[in-house]
Image (tube, rainbow, N blue to C red):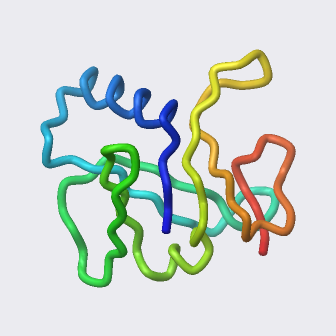
């Protein structure tokens, strides 16, 4: 399962409102090759399911992930921080053995 923290859910609502995205849009998360640790997180808004998608509901948000990315993201929490040490979405991934200093890439 992939979960969304309450702070991240509020920020998603703000962003979707700013971009005038309707209720049929959801969060799509995935893993792509790259970054200083080998794999990077990707997050977008989407409104089309793809074959093989894994679908989750958390804090009122629909989260969709392709099966290949789900193997890396199982158990991950999407959070949001607006603190002094950085602002933005964060992936709290229990499967990551190593992350880079900025937290945007990881390895397993």
Residue plotted at (70% across, 48% down): 104
Seen in the picture, residue 28 relative to 24 is either above or below; the reply is: below
Residue plotted at (33% across, 68% down): 55
In the rendered structure, the answer to whether residue 97 lies left or right of residue 33 reads: right
Seen in the picture, residue 20 relative to 89 is either above or below; the reply is: above
Q: Based on the displayed image, in which of its 4 quarters is residue 63 positioned?
A: bottom left
Q: Position of residue 19 (x, y in %)?
A: 25, 27
Residue plotted at (46% across, 50% down): 43
Q: Position of residue 75 (x, y in %)?
A: 60, 67
In the rendered structure, the answer to whether residue 96 lies left or right of residue 55 reads: right
Q: 7 and 38: which one is in front?
A: 7
Seen in the picture, residue 27 relative to 7 is either above or below; the reply is: below
In the rendered structure, the answer to whether residue 93 lies left or right of residue 47 reads: right
Q: 79 and 28: which one is in front?
A: 79
Quadrant in which the C terminus appears: bottom right
Q: Position of residue 105 (x, y in %)?
A: 72, 56
Residue plotted at (41% across, 68% down): 65
How many discs appear?
Answer: 0
Q: Position of residue 40 (x, y in %)?
A: 64, 59
Seen in the picture, residue 107 relative to 28 is either above or below; the reply is: below
């Amino acid at each position: 399962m992939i979960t969304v923290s309450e702070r991240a859910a509020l920020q998603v609502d703000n962003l979707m409102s700013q971009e005038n995205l309707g209720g049929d849009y959801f969060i799509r998360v995935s893993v792509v090759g790259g970054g200083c640790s080998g794999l990077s997180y990707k997050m977008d808004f989407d409104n089309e399911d793809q074959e093989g998608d894994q679908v989750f509901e958390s804090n009122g948000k629909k989260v969709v992930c392709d099966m290949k990315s789900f193997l890396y993201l199982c158990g991950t929490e999407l959070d949001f921080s607006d603190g002094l040490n950085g602002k933005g979405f964060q992936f709290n991934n229990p499967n990551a053995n190593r992350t880079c200093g900025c937290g945007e890439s990881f390895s397993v």
